[in-house]
Amino acid sequence: MTLLAIGILLFAGTHLVKALAPALRSDLQRRLGANAYKGIFSLLVVAGIGLIIAGWRSTVPQWVYTPPASAHLVALALLVVAFWLMVVSSRPSRLRRVIRHPQLSGVALWGIAHLLLNGDSRAVLLFGGMTVWALVEMAAINHRDGVWIKAEAPKPGADLLNLLITGVVVALLAYLHPWLAGVAITGPLPQ
């Protein structure tokens, strides 16, 4: 569990530097150079992800709560919306005029959905930790950047394409989930 916690803290902490300590970030970029800073940042993020994976796999989960069976469909719907937001975060969309931080909002919904589906200790740490990070990051960015200047609305075709991309991403992740996470979307893998 320690590796999992360190990985989450490393991943979240590295990302929070830009929003919570912009002067530190600028000073490091000036002293190291922009490319060296980006390289170190990338290595720290990858190390965080690696520690999260190693921590997840090495932790013996303990039950914290039993997820309600009635939440299964709600959680799956939240996951579809989460991935839609993540797709929209890097593409033109009218949704970006309504939601200031689509990617971080998607991460928060992803975490909440997984908390509705998983009640063990490592799930609470990972998905709860990532949800808290996304919410803190949004608040910090809002504080740092101030007034939200909304982008121009794209043509409706952009949103249709975003929905199509989201459908492909969700289908691909549903197919790969047993190999990525060890659990099929419909439940545990047969032994």
Image: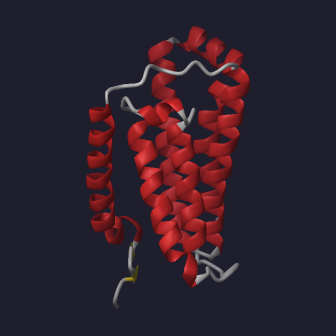
Determine whether 34 is above or below 100 in the image. above
| Near-viewer residue (7 or 155) | 155
Check the picture and name the quadrant holding the C terminus.
bottom left
| Near-viewer residue (138 or 19) | 138
Determine whether 89 is above or below 171 in the image. above
Q: In which quarter of the image is residue 147?
A: top right
Q: Quadrant of residue 146?
A: top right
Measuring from the top left, give residue 44's x and y in whole percent.
53, 37
Which residue does the image show at 47% across and 52% down from the upper left? 82
One can see residue 57 in this view: no
- In the displayed structure image, the side of residue 184 where residue 95 appears, left or right: right
Check the picture and name the quadrant holding the N terminus.
bottom right
One can see residue 65 in this view: yes
- In the displayed structure image, the side of residue 86 where residue 17 appears, left or right: right
Which residue does the image show at 26% across and 40% down from the upper left? 161
Which residue does the image show at 46% across and 67% down from the upper left? 76
Determine whether 90 is above or below 170 in the image. above
- Colour scheme employed for the rendering of this structure: secondary structure
Q: How many marks?
A: 0
Query: Which residue in the rendered view is the most extreme toward the top?
Result: 30
Query: Which residue in the rendered view is the most extreme toward the front?
Result: 156
Measuring from the top left, give residue 134's x and y in whole percent.
62, 44
| Near-viewer residue (94 or 110) | 94
Which residue does the image show at 31% across and 33% down from the upper left? 156
